[in-house]
């Protein structure tokens, strides 16, 4: 049994890693395979933070590097995403209950280990982040999949006006920055995705293959349909969303460090 818990955090961008690096004592830096890694102690645990870059290949490579080199007890992907669920606003949170590739023949992918077309964040970490969000007064609203299944009637408080919102829903991973309204509507109606990004499913895939508990948390930084270039006009939203996701992720890490989450396989 290891004496020190190791938690890996993976992000795509520097603005997403910064809130974590600010919390590390005497942070040191390494670079492996073109991936910047910052590490050090956080509340008695080793925290390893990687800026893996954008896109599914970069994400998968970074996840495997983190697992091979640092042997984390769990891996949390934290970052920003474009909103697909129309009820989500800038800064709202999507917890990755399900993660799906786009533009991919997933039945063929599932012919290889770990034999899955889609992936799910680890139950214990998912339940922990839902508890954190409730504790901080975030309002849970129905995901698109829950709306389709008619489960919205089970939500006790649908009056979320003025509250920060979150869904426990579906994250779609694409290697394109999709803006075509027809494409976006197809993503909503085919897999009921609440947000779109470019890395999460690849990280989930690698963690599942390596039997490493993982969690994907995204905060909405923009609405899908905007051009990539238009993001330059509201960089503050991107930074604020990155910090919102990181704040929730750090609360989950606190629970891991304090032993309030059992990560046994």
Image: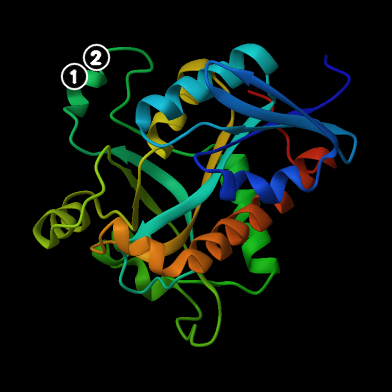
Splitting the image into 4 quarters, where does residue 120 fall? top left
The residue singled out by tag 2 in the image is: 111
Percent x, y of residue 258 = 85, 42
The residue singled out by tag 1 in the image is: 108
Task: Please indicate whether residue 112 sits to the left or right of residue 89 in the image.
Answer: left
| Residue 139 vertical placement versus 20 (above, below) | below
Please, what secondary structure does the residue beneath circle 1 have? Answer: helix
Task: Please indicate whether residue 249 sits to the left or right of residue 187 in the image.
Answer: right
Q: Residue at x 34, y 58 (%)?
A: 194
Indicate the quadrant containing the N terminus: top left, top right, bottom left or bottom right: top right
Disc 2 to disc 1: CB gap under 8 Å? yes
Please, what secondary structure does the residue beneath circle 2 have? Answer: loop
For disc 1, the neighbor class at 10 Å (few under 14, some 14 to 19, many from 20) is few
For disc 2, the neighbor class at 10 Å (few under 14, some 14 to 19, many from 20) is few
Percent x, y of residue 234 = 44, 69
Q: Residue at x 66, y 48 (%)?
A: 18
| Residue 252 vertical placement versus 84 (above, below) | above
Distance from disc 2 to disc 1, alpha carbons, whole Å, reads 5 Å
As rendered, which of 80 and 127 lies closer to the eye? 80
């Amino acid at each position: 049994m290891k004496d020190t818990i190791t938690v890996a955090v993976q992000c795509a961008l520097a603005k997403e890693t910064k809130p974590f690096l600010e919390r590390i004592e005497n942070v040191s830096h390494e670079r492996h395979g073109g991936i910047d890694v910052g590490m050090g102690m956080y509340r008695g645990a080793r925290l390893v933070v990687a800026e893996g870059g954008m896109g599914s290949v970069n994400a998968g490579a970074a996840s495997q590097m983190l697992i091979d080199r640092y042997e984390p007890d769990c891996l949390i992907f934290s970052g920003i995403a474009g909103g697909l669920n129309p009820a989500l606003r800038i800064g709202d949170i999507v917890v990755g209950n399900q993660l799906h590739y786009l533009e991919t023949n997933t039945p063929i992918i599932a012919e290889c280990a770990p034999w899955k077309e889609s992936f799910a964040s680890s139950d214990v970490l998912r339940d922990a982040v839902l508890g954190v969000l409730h504790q901080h007064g975030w309002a849970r609203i129905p995901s698109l999949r829950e709306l389709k299944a008619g489960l919205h009637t089970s939500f006790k408080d649908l009056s979320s006006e003025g509250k920060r919102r979150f869904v426990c829903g579906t994250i779609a991973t694409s290697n394109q920055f999709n803006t075509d309204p027809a494409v976006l509507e197809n993503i909503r109606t085919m897999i009921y995705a609440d947000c779109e990004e470019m890395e999460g499913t690849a990280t989930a895939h690698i963690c599942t293959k390596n039997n490493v508990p993982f969690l994907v948390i995204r905060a909405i930084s923009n609405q899908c349909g905007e051009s990539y270039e238009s993001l330059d006009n509201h960089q503050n939203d991107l930074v604020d969303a990155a910090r919102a996701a990181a704040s929730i992720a750090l609360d989950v890490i606190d629970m891991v460090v304090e032993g309030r989450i059992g990560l046994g396989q």
